[in-house]
Amino acid sequence: MGISEQFLKKWIKRIKPQYYAAFFGALIVGFICHMPVMTKNLPVYDTFWNIYFDQDMISSGRQFLTFACGPTSYYNLPWINGIVSLIFLALTAVCFTELFRLERKSTAFLTGAVIAAFPAVTGTFAFIYTADGYMMAFFLSVLCVLLADRLKWGFIPGAFLCGFSIGVYQSYLSVTMLLCIFILVGDLLKSDRNRKEILYKALRFLGTGAFGYLFYVLSLKIMLALSGRSLSGYQGTDRVGGIELSGLLTGLKSAFTDFREFTFSGGIFTENIWMKIAYVLFILTAAGLFCYTAWKEKLYQKPVRILCIVLLLALIPFAASAVCIISPGVLFHILMRMPWVVLFLFGLSFMDGKKAFGLIGFLFAGILVFNFILSANVVYFNLNERYEKTYALCIRIADRLEQTEGYQTGDPVAILGGYPNAEYYPSTDITEKITRGYHETEGDYCIESSEKYAEFMKHYLNVTVQVPEFDEQLAIADTDEFRQMDCFPKDGCIKKIRGVWVVKLNG
């Protein structure tokens, strides 16, 4: 047997059965959950800018996104992007299994299932063209904690991984922060853990986060300077360098309010009665087992540890919604809710090895996973419906435009009004109750501007539409001539104004 074979055999032996369970739990459930969006082109409003795009989002503070998405090409390839994303999710499940030291394969499998079906993953897969980069960042946000947890100097590579993860999508810093908090809480709960070891671990975690964020900020500033660009300010990205003390209290209040409202009344985890029951009972079971563990470890005899645990738990809302501290008015998309999966998995870890209550907790978690899968498929169902409706609408618009006397391909065209007038095209969306919680997946159409109508027609109808400048479109929309036009599809819905062919959908 060669050296390489011996090395490989040695490492295969080190792979625990729990790792396999977590890995395949994520893969199996991931395919069941997300196969519709992986095997079909289901566009959202940004898809048309990303059919081919290098993901250079440095102006949004995501300087590493282009590198994370590069290996799978910059084309929108749902099948490839989806498979790579699921592999990263499966590897992340393995990291969680090791971090929480899960003993049972069933717990590890369910950990992978929760991760793969989590609503934030569904929200990300709706934007499948960039999902692989985001899932890589999610994996790195967890891996950096594992390195800092298990290796004496692991916080050094961990900091770079953390910074890279933030540079792909800033919200994953909250994943790292929450995970550090829960690992420390778990150690404080166990009486056999040395206080000095816990303190050193806390310092390593602090170093990982602090140096990771520093690496992110410095690399961003350097790359901005080299490219001659600046931050757009989108979602508070122009404040990444620091927080003004005058706005700190407002940010903290915003973070706490956001955490409370989303966790307890956000609707994502409680879409139907079965989910409501399972969600509440899962939380109560996890909380009960947490208290049982504290009692079993005689934590009541160690007031200092109790105080430390209370202080760490008090940080949870601010860590989960940390983006709100930097930018109190941020619009929290479902894509940014990935930190909440850490809450679920921490609760699930207390059910590992527990017989009666563990099985009860597994049942509630299983019900939630099943409903997450259903919700994901409803989201993808509506994405398909929206595509079909948009396709049909664009065919009718293109046909009417080409039949208009005097129109020639290459003439400037403005398709104004966003969505068609509801009087002529009433909404037929039957999924709004579920899809409203998933960013930009609700409604009847996936486009709403001249530019996106033009891109849709270009790629799906082979129809070329030249769009005038946005300011020119605004000026046309402000004319009496436009206001007096009938809405599509009535006669008079297409007219030449100021040298531009105008299609009035609404307004």
Image: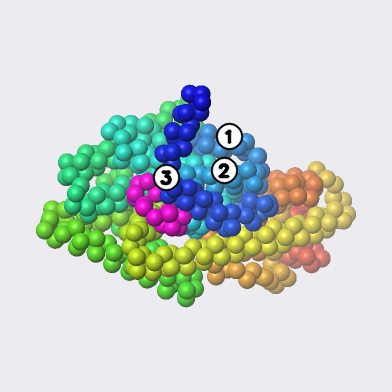
Three-letter amino acid code at disc 2?
Val
**Percent from the top left, x then y, of residue 137?**
46, 42
> Which residue is at the front of the view, 269 or 113?
113
Task: Specify whether 368 is left or right of 496.
Answer: left
Viewer-proximal residue, 85 or 334?
A: 85
Q: Is residue 221 visible?
A: no
The residue closer to the viewer here, 169 or 413, is 169
Return the x and y of residue 46 as percentages of the image width and height: 61, 49
Q: Nearer the viewer, mark 3 or mark 2?
A: 3
Real-space Cα distance between discs 1 and 2? 10 Å
Identified at 55% across, 54% down, the residue is 28
Give the mark nearest the N terminus, 3 or 2.
3
Q: Earlier in the sequence, mark 1 or mark 2?
A: 1
* Residue where numbered disc 1 is placed: 71
Is residue 63 magenta-colored?
Answer: no
Residue tagged 2 = 84
* Disc number placed over residue 346 in the picture, else none: none
Label 3 sits on what residue type? Lys
Mark carried by residue 16: 3
Q: Amino acid at mark 1?
A: Pro
Q: Position of residue 64 (x, y in %)?
A: 49, 35
Q: Residue at x 20, y 41 (%)?
A: 197
Please, what secondary structure does the residue beneath circle 2 have?
helix
Residue extent of the magenta highlight? 96-111
- Residues tagged 1 and 2 counted as in contact (Cβ below 8 A): yes
Residue positioned 75% across, 54% down in the render = 502
Q: Position of residue 374 (x, y in %)?
A: 56, 65
Give the CA distance from mark 3 to mark 2: 23 Å
The mark closer to the camera, 1 or 3, is 3
Estimate how packed mark 1 is, as few (under 14), some (14 to 19) or many (20 or more) residues with alpha carbons within 10 Å: few
